[in-house]
Image (cartoon, grey):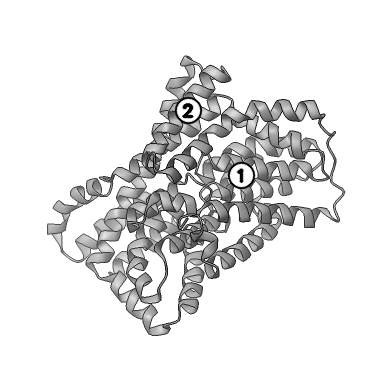
Amino acid sequence: MTIALISFAILLLLGVPIAYVLGMTTVIYIFATDNLGLVLTVPQRLYSGMENYGLLAIPLFMLAGELMNSGGITKRLVNVAKTFFGHYRGGLAYVNVIANTMLAAIIGSATAQIAMMSRTMVPEMEKAGYSKPFSTATTAAAGLLGPIIPPSMMFIIYGVGSGASIGDMFLAGVIPGILLSFSFICIIAFIGMKAQWPVQPKATFKEMISSFVSVLPALAVPVIIIAGILTGVFTATESAAIACVVAIIVGSLVYRELKVSSIPGVLSQTVITTAVITILIAMANIFGWMLSFEQVPQQIAAWMVSLSDSPIVFLLLVNIFLLLVGMFMDGIAALIILVPIFMPLLPTYGVDPIHFGIIICINLTIGILTPPVGSGLFIASSITKVSIGDLVKALWPFLIIALIVLLLLTYIPALSLWLPNL
């Protein structure tokens, strides 16, 4: 097992894609321990890791997001936020967060959202007089809302791995997402007290009404998803298919921007993005199988129980551990590996699986903006041409407020469990 862990660390430091790191480490373990009989089991494990109905929601939600981008829904969400909030001092920074909040209810992926909004909002903010590092930091931080406000790919993967209801996970993410969004708005207001940020011309009442009416069809998608799950009309997985249908109707018949000619591009982009995620899930599955074979989860569980029997201390240790993991590993891969390790511990400490799902997902999401491996940092930096050093300096206030929100969610379970328990 030691050879496997050393190989894992070396491959990760060499910059090998995390999916291949997981697969190669497992193969190295098999040959190093001379368990050659396990080689025949690897293909079966790769397949069984994907054989879950809940995972069908991932490509469907990815498709819904691509359809909305091509159908003009995304730009209308940004426009309505700009119309209502752009005239306040620092208004475009508020617009950035609010637009990301609305987009999070459509896209469900932090990296996809950071990439999209870095191209959209950073140039707009820079033109209006905001510094490029601050504009990029605001966009990257607001992208954290993607995996928290439902629908969320991380919630889907957690639900599949833990057996928790994906629908309940979606509902549990609503209040934490709104709380995080409001916290970002507050930190922007605090920073803006000393900064002489520009003010946009105030939109007329007619322009406000017009933009609000134009965005109503776009808002139909998240409303239908949440309402359908709450009422039990369809499951979380089925809601992904409904979202695709609504996106097609709105984009092609209401906004008339979704053309037949754009469908092949939408489908190919969905396939590429889905393939990246699914190969990661498959490889992480065999890596987790290797850990289980060596009884690593049981050893970690016994060690943590020996440290303290207090749920408060347990959750604090989990938070510290997850934040450290998030600095070095992709969030989805870490989620797949760690969920089987922590799930057996939850009954011992009386922690609700839905509450724990929110904690682990937010922890690992914060990791995409922390050096040295934070993918969100590199995506935002490469698109806006801001150095990693300048970006990290501008990001610290947002990361600190995100950690404060994480602590609140950790020790006030009602913030996560109120909606699922209704």
Where's the N terminus, which quadrant?
bottom left
Considering only order in the chain, which callout, 1 or 2, is on the residue closer to the N terminus? 1
Disc 2 to disc 1, C-alpha distance: 20 Å
On the question of residue 3 being in view, the answer is yes
Residue 128 image position (x, y, % from top left)? 80, 37
Q: Front-most of 356 and 138?
A: 356
Residue appearing at x 51%, y 39% in the figure: 107
Residue appearing at x 30%, y 60% in the figure: 288
Residue appearing at x 71%, y 52% in the figure: 185
Q: Vertical placement of 384 versus 144: above or below?
A: above
Residue that lies at the very extreme toward the left in this rendered image: 37
Amino acid type, label 1:
Thr
Q: Front-most of 404 and 130?
A: 404
Q: Which label was assigned to residue 91?
A: none
Residue 145 image position (x, y, % from top left)? 57, 49
Residue 388 image position (x, y, % from top left)? 64, 52
Q: Is residue 90 left or right of residue 297?
A: right
Amino acid type, label 2:
Val
Secondary structure beneath dot 2 equals helix
Residue 216 image position (x, y, % from top left)? 61, 30
Secondary structure beneath dot 1 equals helix
User: Mark 2, mark 1: which one is toward the viewer?
Assistant: 2
Q: Is residue 158 left or right of residue 251?
A: left
| Residue matched to label 1 | 101
| Residue matched to label 2 | 246
Residue appearing at x 65%, y 63% in the figure: 400
Q: Is residue 307 left or right of residue 409?
A: left
Q: Vertical placement of 97 versus 164: above or below?
A: above
Label 1 crowd (10 A; few <14 / some 14-19 / many >=20): many
